[in-house]
Image (cartoon, rainbow, N blue to C red):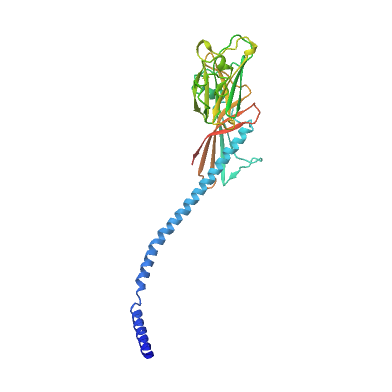
């Protein structure tokens, strides 16, 4: 029995060896096919990798120029905030400079020189005239009236004060511009709110109590902010007369969303000839365009950033509050 099993094992081993010897060389065609496919794929793959590396370098260089140009915008904002005496004053004027250190040596950011131009686009009067509210004549009547404003979270108050120098002065409207996008907090024309002195009413103040026939302009967007305007028509316009008790009249409106007070805000009063009667004398306001251009000193390629700035300061020498209303990239 053992001999038979041993004999059968030898026969099976012999047959297996014959089978293996018969398949010798079958792997060669497969290897050749794989080598051919590899040769066809490797060249384009290397080319694609090279293109990807070059594209990555281009994107990196573009990003470095963008950061350099943005540094130019930041430097211009610093000059505006701190009221550099070289800043342009008259509309259309500009100031240009390159980023330099204190010794006057060029500053290269990521291998780029940075040129900055600051252009004066408008002052406070021009800003108001372009609101399309009929305020076409920039007459200023601060000889008989001044205006002030106060904003808290969700509430804005406009106050017009008459100095008593002339008799029976009238106003046509008062308005405010708040940086940001807002609406009235509640419906100002809701018949369910008949008493303007009701704390729940969106509009209050002795201007609306004493002269209730005012017209409310729907708030609209302008220069990155929201305009609220209240107008009177005919013979029932607000007047100050000669009574010192009514030398000051105010109007308060509530707005939403109720967030922190807007960083920038202005108010004004329109008088009988539909001009801008008076604006805050203590407030300096305007718009600048900043053009910052980064130039690669090796390749000469450029990236330009254009920023549109609204700014205000409480006096001629006070630090300014600035806000970017728009920001554009020109690669």
Query: Which residue is at a point 40% across and 58% down the rendered structure image?
Result: 44
**142 shown above or below 31:** above
Q: Is residue 204 above or below residue 103?
A: above
- Whether residue 5 sits left or right of residue 301 in the image: it is left
Judging depth in this view, the residue of 107 and 34 nearest the camera is 34
Asked where in the image residue 31 lies, by quadrant, the reply is bottom left
| Visible residue check, residue 293 | yes
Q: Where residue 216 appears, x then y in whole percent?
A: 50, 20
Residue 297 placed where, x, y %? 55, 45
| 244 vs 70, nearest the viewer | 244
75 vs 149, nearest the viewer: 149
Q: Is residue 139 visible?
A: no
Q: Horizontal placement of 283 versus 225: left or right?
A: right
Total of numbered circles in the picture? 0
* Residue at image location 56% in from the left, 18% down from the top: 269
Q: Quadrant of the N terminus?
A: bottom left
Provide residue 205's location: percent of width, then percent of height.
Answer: 58, 19
Foreground of the two, 89 or 187: 187
Residue 167 found in image quarter = top right
């Amino acid at each position: 029995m053992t001999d038979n099993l041993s004999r059968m094992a030898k026969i099976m081993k012999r047959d297996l060896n014959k089978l293996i010897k018969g398949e010798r060389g079958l792997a060669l065609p497969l290897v050749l096919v794989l080598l051919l496919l590899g040769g066809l794929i490797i060249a384009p793959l290397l080319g694609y990798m090279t293109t990807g590396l070059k594209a990555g370098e281009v994107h990196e260089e573009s990003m470095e120029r963008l950061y350099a140009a943005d540094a130019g915008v930041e430097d211009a904002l610093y000059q505006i905030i701190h009221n550099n005496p070289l800043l342009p004053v008259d509309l259309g004027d500009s100031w240009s400079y390159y980023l330099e250190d204190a010794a006057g040596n060029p500053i290269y950011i990521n291998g780029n020189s940075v040129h900055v131009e600051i252009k004066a686009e408008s002052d406070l009067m021009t800003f108001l005239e372009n609101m399309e509210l009929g305020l076409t004549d920039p007459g200023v009547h601060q000889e008989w009236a001044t205006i002030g404003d106060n904003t808290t979270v969700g509430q804005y108050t406009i106050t017009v004060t008459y100095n008593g120098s002339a008799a029976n002065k009238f106003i046509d409207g008062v308005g405010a511009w708040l940086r940001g996008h807002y609406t009235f907090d509640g419906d100002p024309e809701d018949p369910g709110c008949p008493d303007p002195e009701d704390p729940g009413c969106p509009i209050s103040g002795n201007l609306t109590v004493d002269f209730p026939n005012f017209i409310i302009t729907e708030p609209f967007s302008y220069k990155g902010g929201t305009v609220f305007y209240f107008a009177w028509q005919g013979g029932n316009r607000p007047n100050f007369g000669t009574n010192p008790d009514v030398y000051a009249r105010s109007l308060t409106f509530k707005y939403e969303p109720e967030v922190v007070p807007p960083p920038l805000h202005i108010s004004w009063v329109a008088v009988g000839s539909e001009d801008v009667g008076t604006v805050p004398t203590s407030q300096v306001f305007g718009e600048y365009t900043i053009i910052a251009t980064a130039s690669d000193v090796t390749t000469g390629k450029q990236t330009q950033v254009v920023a549109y700035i609204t700014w205000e300061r409480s006096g001629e020498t006070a630090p300014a509050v600035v806000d970017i209303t728009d920001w554009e990239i020109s690669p």
